[in-house]
Amino acid sequence: MSLWDSIKKTATEQAKAQFLDVIEWLDDSRDTIVYRFPVFNQAIQDGGKLVVREGQAAVFVNEGKMSEVFGPGSYELSTRTKAIAGFFETIKYALNYPYKGDIYFVNTRQFADQKWGTPNPIMMHDKEIGPVRIRAFGNYAYRITDPKQFHTAVSGTRDRYTVDDLDGQLRGLMLQHISDAVAQSGIPFLDLAANQVEFARQLQEATAAEFGALGLGLEKVTVQNVSLPEELQKILDQKIGMGMVGGDMGKFMQYQTAQ
């Protein structure tokens, strides 16, 4: 291709491209985690602006290579801005050329009230009782703490990544560590229902590292219910009854008869 043909081709591409004065994301949803800004065949205007709002981060990917992450603020997209110029191979075109890459906006606010639970009873071992089966469920909350890691490990090149897309994976991580949480808490199974706060704390500690590997921070875990098998529930009821009468067997028998 001759130099003149190259110049004409560049001019044609510039004419077709739409110039971007402001790059920003106005999130109108409650469940979008990552949004890819539409920059296909668009030219970044020299002197334009990148606007990142509170609760957001912006990640630039240039020809498949990750760039730095922009936190909340307003940034000038200019050849005079060193921090911006380093991100674009297209800088040699003075930015007025279709950008060969992707811009991702990441939602960094907290996603609360996410559900976890055991779809089926899970088998555990108690040093006093032996093997038992329990059900449990509750809520958890998380946020993206490392947008770059999350993009690399989870969301990738998708146009939009939502809470529902991540739900199954995170539920699996929670369930995977229930046994670890119970073991670390040292709480007997018969006392789990009365120690849900401690159970939740141990579950959060046992699972936090797995979330961190995805670029997420596990910020809160609650246990709303722990269900024991019927036979163990009867033993628990008896234990409660004994406590009510101070351990006196005669009074306990009277209590059972009254019940």
Image: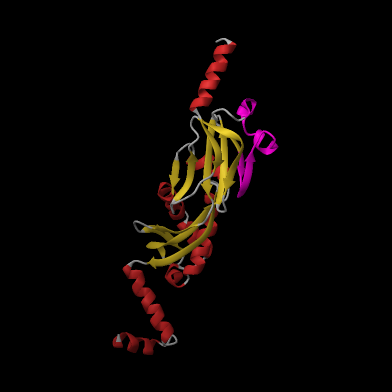
Residue 86 in magenta stretch: yes
Residue 40, x across and y down, in percent: 48, 32
Quick check: 194 above or below 179? below
Q: Is residue 97 left or right of residue 171?
A: right
**Closer to the camera, 55 or 163?**
55
Residue in the image at 49% along x and 65% along y: 199
Residue 71, x across and y down, in percent: 61, 48
Residue 85, x across and y down, in percent: 66, 34
Boundaries of the magenta span: 68-94
Answer with the quarter of the image where residue 70 lies: top right
Quick check: 210 above or below 159? below
Residue 159 in magenta stretch: no
Residue in the image at 37% along x and 79% along y: 238
User: Can the viewer see residue 183 in this picture?
Assistant: no
Quick check: 161 above or below 7? below
Q: Is residue 165 left or right of residue 96?
A: left
**Closer to the camera, 166 or 205?**
166
